Image (spheres, grey):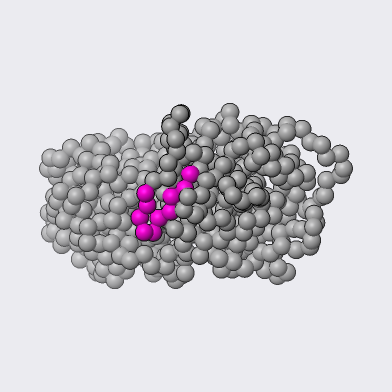
Amino acid sequence: MSDPQSLQPRLSPPPHQPNVPAPGAAPVPGAAPAIPPTGPDEVALLIDDRPVVVRKGATVLQAAEKAGILVPHYCYHPGISIAGNCRMCLVEIEKMPKLQIGCATAAAPGMVVRTSNDRVKGVRAGIQEFLLINHPLDCPICDQAGECRLQSYEKDYGRGFSRFAEEKVHFPKRYDIGRSVLFDAERCIKCTRCIRFCDEVSKSHELALFSRGDHTIVGAFPGRPLDNLYSGCTVDVCPVGALTWKPFRFKARVWFLKNVPSVCAGCARGCNVNVATFRNRIHRMTPRVNADVNDYWMCDAGRQSYETLYARPRLEQPIVRPLPALPGAPEGPRPPAEADSPWDGALDRAAALLREVARTGGRDSLAAIVSARLSLEDLYVAKRVLGDLAGIPRLAIPSHEEGEDDHLLIRRDKTPNGRGAELLGLGAPSSSRVREILDDVASGRVKGVVVVGEDLLALPGIAPPLLDRLEALVVIDWWKSPTVERAHVALPSCGYGEFDGTVVNFQGRAQRLRAALRPPGEADPAWRILRDLGRRFGLANEYASAPSVFDEIAVKVPAFAGLTFRALGDAGAPVSGAAAPRSAGAPRAGA
């Protein structure tokens, strides 16, 4: 079995498996440990001579985590109830003759706990050896290798060899337990985390233990495969690689992955995630703990939401198509169809088209449709450039709704920044406002449209001939959508994971998107494209970076007063006066 400690820092936790503590302060040599004073709802105890104060009801394991002491465990997870069946977290407590499990023993005032003396280590070594009796040592082909707790604890508690000479008990391997999850029963240590997750969090109840003794196996009830909307979380909580996520199997070794903290853009919840990349490609997304947004979980749809980045052809260069035959337009050679164009030429052409339509048809003949999938910075610069400087009187935001809000995380609103658009003064996403614009296109009242981040032809009831009526269609998008194929000027923007920015979730919490990839070709963040277009209309602001745009938003938009891009950190911050109660949230730990 390989040693993962040589591949990662000593206490570096798997990104999606929390509750591995950060190192705490070591006791002072020679100083007598003393139990500190406590408040009415607190308990003070000593753990390995370190004084710890925790709230009443906290367990010894939780108190040790607070002190920065690692108590090894398999079955305990802070987001689900305590089972106490792996026995790996045994600790010695003064005045108790037997070792106690730290995960289920409540911290008591004055308790003195030892987590790493020879007696404790000897028992844990026995448990580790017991768990490895039937566990196959297939680390070289296991997706969990590098994040496996059996691997992590083997260094401290393993013998380095096996005394078990008998035949191992064999179970089904590569068992298709659900739509997206594969089960290797031989790796399972029956910690029951997956069963408890399905019972308590997803409340779908597909899994249970079957058979007895060393033939006990986790299985799905007949006719009820593991197909709930959060089935990927059972893979996250599995500590040993028995459950694996099909889309990620054999894609990359986890120690090669670079995990970038970001936010899921699959719906208005904005679950905190780690975006794992290798060789400039996203290979998986896993939930990142944020008690104010998603606790420890994320849905399967959000987990795979990055796949559209690779499923569609990317727009990598600016495209300029022949000028429409505008009355009074200057004569001259037209660029060839489908020709790539330098950025300056494309932006000049886009600005000239919009000016020409405004000159011949008036400002009311212009409109813009921008997406609530864009970042706050994109939307703000779009409002400034298209609305204030180019004089486009109507900016509409399409709504994207699908399904219903569920009991846990999923939101019907599939846009990550609808609340942000509303706070910026662009109005809430509205299909009727978009429909009004398109009706005016059909009637000829609107002749020029700027589209940012949307495919108009994906909206219900919109046919290609409608866009062919436009005299100016400028599109900024990341992929070669059908709308891009009809644009007079198309400008390539970054896709998910390729830019820094901010989104505001439905609760009114501003959170940071982080760039994890290099964009393909000449793609640029949408705010920077809009900035460069704005310079053709007299924009003086430089907007050197996304933080500089956000900081201007914080100065000029009252709802964001007092916030800074840097201060948002990894957990985000509530927008002033916009925070909503945490509704439809995940159950608390141990609920």
In terms of depth relative to the viewer, which is nearer, 227 or 445?
227
Residue 75 sits inside the magenta stretch = no
Q: In which quarter of the view is residue 341 placed? A: top left
Question: Which residue sits at x=36%, y=39%?
Answer: 523
Instruction: Provide residue 81's location: percent of width, then percent of height.
Output: 56, 61
Instruction: Provide residue 585's location: percent of width, then percent of height.
Output: 43, 64
Q: In which quarter of the view is residue 534 placed? A: top left
Instruction: Provide residue 346's location: percent of width, then percent of height.
Output: 27, 40
In terms of depth relative to the viewer, which is nearer, 204 or 105?
105
- Quadrant in which the N terminus is drawn: top right
- Is any part of residue 279 visible from this angle? yes
- What is the tally of numbered marks visible in this picture? 0
Residue 339 drawn above or below residue 402: above
- Is any part of residue 367 visible from this angle? no
Residue 252 drawn above or below residue 429: above
Q: What stretch is highlighted in magenta?
A: 37-46
